[in-house]
Amino acid sequence: MKTARRHPLDPRLLFSIFVAIGVGTVLLDQSPRLALLWTSLLAMSIYYRGHREVPADFTLRNIGRGALLGAIISVPLLVFLSEQLRTFTERLYAARDPVLLFYQVCLVSAPIEEYFFRGIVQSRLGSSLSIGLYALVPLLYFLPHAPVLVAFIVFVVMGALGIVYAYVRDRYGLAASIACHVMVGFVLQVMPSLIASLRLALS
């Protein structure tokens, strides 16, 4: 009996390739490994975009709405958990430099992940699957280099954020979900290290 072959543009097949790359690179150091994983997501997104349109719904109003919602979610957490967030982020990304974290989190990770999970997976397979697959990403990113409990906490947090990003994408479009993700990443993952660096410089 023949098994059905998935179409090369099936987001589940693309995600499976992404997982295979992640599993195949577990022995690499964290920084180059993350760069390779983000590059593979970008390459698959470009490949998909070459065959099918992914509407961005790009307007300044939508971007503003996404960024505002991201700030509403993340600023209270920054106020109460700044030091814990800094320790968490610097360990996960193997980086302490706020500029490097900004590059990794806001300029690379956020737009690439949103384009793939919200622009491709969610538009083709629905919100539930995009949230579920997105929640699995930290296990792939961080589990080889972080304790299981830490990876599980990030799994839960990214699952919750995935719900937010999926809602924003459904309500205001892909550009808004990218803006929301960038804002959350900046406030929760970059600002704690930036604040610590400024305190050190002024002390």
Image (cartoon, rainbow, N blue to C red):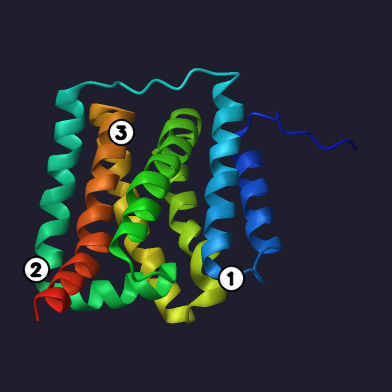
Dots 2, 3 in contact, CB < 8 A: no
Residue 130 in percent (x, y) is at 45, 43
Residue 188 placement: quadrant: bottom left
Q: Which residue is drawn at 18% across and 40% down?
A: 67
Q: Which residue matches tag 2?
A: 79
Categorize mark 1 by other alpha carbons within 10 Å: few (<14), some (14-19), many (20+).
few
Q: Which residue matches tag 3?
A: 169
Q: Which of marks 2 and 3 is in front?
A: 2
Dots 2, 1 in contact, CB < 8 A: no
Q: Which mark is residue 29?
A: 1
Location of the N terminus (image quadrant): top right
Residue 23 in percent (x, y) is at 67, 62
Dots 3, 1 in contact, CB < 8 A: no
Q: Is residue 128 above or below residue 153?
A: above
Query: In terms of depth relative to the viewer, which is nearer, 197 or 111?
Result: 197
Measured Cα–Cα span from mark 2 to mark 3 = 27 Å
Residue 143 in percent (x, y) is at 53, 72
Of the two numbered discs 3 and 1 on the same chain, state the one appearing first in sequence. 1
Taking the image as shown, residue 129 lies to the left or right of residue 197, namely: right
Categorize mark 2 by other alpha carbons within 10 Å: few (<14), some (14-19), many (20+).
few
The secondary element bearing badge 3 is classed as: helix
